[in-house]
Amino acid sequence: MRLDTKVRIEDKLYLVRFKPDHEAHLVIIDQEVCRSNCKDRPCTFFCPARVYEWEDANNKITVGFENCLECGACRIGCPHQNIEWRYPRGGFGVAFKFG
Ligand code: SF4
Ligand code: SF4
């Protein structure tokens, strides 16, 4: 019998609990930069929680900040430093459970 050792991101995210704030702790500073100067939009790939998505209908990046794992990758990953990043307010954000 072969064991499947692949772990899907959805399975890993099951181990995470969130207490979402109503105030966004992640903000796109200038959507025009995303539209015009960032054709590859790496934030839609490097975020492990898929927080950033390109929305064709509205021609903009959407930010599902409620799912943020607070890994900090978008602080350094945006080539235009176009993401304002801070930790969620005290008591809000991510909590990890192991098991
Ligand atoms: S990587 Fe930065 S500039 Fe590019 S689409 Fe994402 S937020 Fe916008
Ligand atoms: S801190 Fe990590 S999980 Fe949160 S939005 Fe940035 S890349 Fe995604």
Image (cartoon, rainbow, N blue to C red):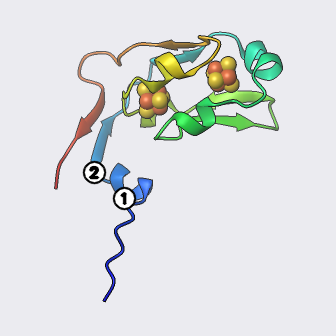
The amino acid type, in three-letter code, at marker 1 is Asp
**Which quarter of the figure is the C terminus placed in?**
bottom left
Q: Is residue 90 left or right of residue 31?
A: left
Q: Is residue 76 left or right of residue 33?
A: left
Which residue does the image show at 75% across and 14% down from the upper left? 33
Q: Is residue 6 left or right of residue 74?
A: left
Q: Disc 1 to disc 2, how far (Cα)?
A: 7 Å
Ligand number 1: quarter of image: top right
The amino acid type, in three-letter code, at marker 2 is Leu
- Are the residues flagged by discs 1 and 2 in contact, CB closer than 8 Å? yes
Which residue does the image show at 54% across and 22% down from the upper left? 77
Which residue does the image show at 25% across and 16% down from the upper left? 90
Q: Residue furthest front?
A: 2
Residue 7 percent location from the top left of the image: 38, 61
Residue 19 percent location from the top left of the image: 31, 34
**Which quarter of the figure is the N terminus placed in?**
bottom left
Which residue does the image show at 50% across and 23% down from the upper left? 74
In the rendered view, tell whether residue 97 sits above or below residue 74. below
In the rendered view, tell whether residue 72 sits above or below residue 85. below
Tell me the quarter of the picture where residue 5 sits.
bottom left
- Residue identified by numbered label 1: 11
Q: Secondary structure at mark 2?
A: loop
* Numbered label attached to residue 29: none
Tell me the quarter of the picture where residue 63 sits.
top right
- Residue identified by numbered label 2: 15
Tell me the quarter of the picture where residue 89 sits.
top left
